[in-house]
Amino acid sequence: MSTAHLTINLHALAQNWRALDAKTKVETGAVVKADGYGLGAGPVSSALAEEGVRKFFVAVAEEGAAVREAVGPEPMVAVFSGHMEGDTDLLRDHDLTPLINSPQQYKRHMEALPDHSFGIQLDSGMNRLGLEAADWAALRSEALALNPVVVMSHLACADDPDHSMNQQQLQRFREMTDGVQVPRSLAATGGTMLGPEFHFEFCRPGIGLYGGMPFAGAKPVVTVDLPVVQVREVAVGETVGYGNTWTARRPSRIATVAAGYADGLHRAIGGGIDTFAGDQPCPVVGRISMDLITVDVTDLPYDPDRLRILNGHQTVDDLAEAAGTIGYEILTSMGSRYSRGYVE
Ligand SMILES: *Cc1c(COP(=O)(O)O)cnc(C)c1O
């Protein structure tokens, strides 16, 4: 086997969903956009449906088909980007619920699929998706008479509990939805942690399910194993990798593993992270290249067959910090070259 291997622990995923669900008194859905945050929308969605999830969310209608297939006919599969031009067949054929973002989308939906379910997405200050207050005011009574399945909005700063934007958006959302009789939703993972006033009728976490911050109690869901291609002796003063950025200060053994930035192990991760042989850390040295990473295994008493870069000791957020990004991007960058295995 010469490709890196991703192991996705569906049991840990289910535990994370249950733990997030237990933080609230309300229903908990699941966001499975971007192919289930890179982990496989099909297996992830069916594991969550088995666990009892009844509301799924994707970014675009094309992603909804695989989720519908995985979860069966009952659960809601909702689309954040709403009803875009060309979406009508997908929405109808896979029974997807668009979250309407603009007066244009509302009109398109009512003309194309007048009897089909829909939800409403409101902009409460993030200025990314959703109806503006004035547009909502104009549509509100007509739209509500048609029984949307949800009225929702999204928080911009929920990963920072002390950010004043959270209360601002909460107040805005309340003003816009006061008296609304349909289910409301404001919280993703961050909002779920902010407390009951953010929960409304249901929460819809994503990243926390997959083991990422801001759910500090998350169980790791992904492990990544990198096959060792070769191991070599490197003498004092010799350098390793592009740009000669690492020089041996002692007689060293360097293992070259088969994965690189083309596999989402960003070049910016650089040094400062480890790979693991069992519990023993072996530091990454030199630059990460497209398909290869070099590792100092001098302190390991044997030549390993593979080294693990993501595990319970080193999480997606550790890699993200080293790369100057967020766990979301590490997960969703895990490319198609990995072989994948699922643990139930
Ligand atoms: C991505 C997304 C979520 C899930 O966010 P997490 O931070 O991953 O929990 C929820 N709602 C909307 C509108 C989103 O775009």
Image (tube, grey):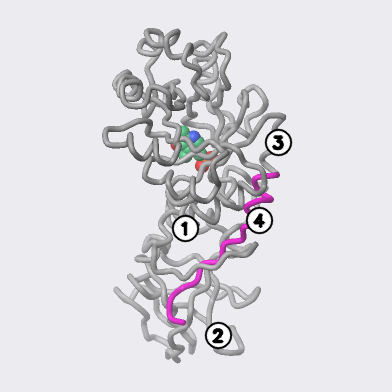
Tag 3–tag 4 contact (CB < 8 Å): no
Of pointers 1 and 3, the one earlier in the residue sequence: 3
Residue range (magenta): 1-18
Label 3 and label 2: CA atoms lie apart by 42 Å
In the displayed structure image, the side of residue 187 where residue 233 appears, left or right: left
**Residue identified by numbered label 4:** 12
Label 1 and label 4: CA atoms lie apart by 24 Å
- Mark 1 is on which residue type? Ala
Of pointers 3 and 2, the one earlier in the residue sequence: 3
Label 2 and label 4: CA atoms lie apart by 27 Å
Label 1 and label 2: CA atoms lie apart by 24 Å
Instruction: From the top left corner, tell me how far across and down residue 312 is, in percent.
Output: 63, 62
In the displayed structure image, the side of residue 53 where residue 92 appears, left or right: left
**Residue identified by numbered label 3:** 23
- Mark 3 is on which residue type? Lys
Could you say which disc has been placed on residue 304 in the image?
Answer: 2
Residue at 60% x, 78% y: name it.
277
Label 3 and label 4: CA atoms lie apart by 17 Å
Of pointers 1 and 4, the one earlier in the residue sequence: 4
Instruction: From the top left corner, tell me how far across and down residue 33 is, in percent.
Output: 45, 45
Residue at 65% x, 54% y: name it.
219
**Residue identified by numbered label 1:** 322
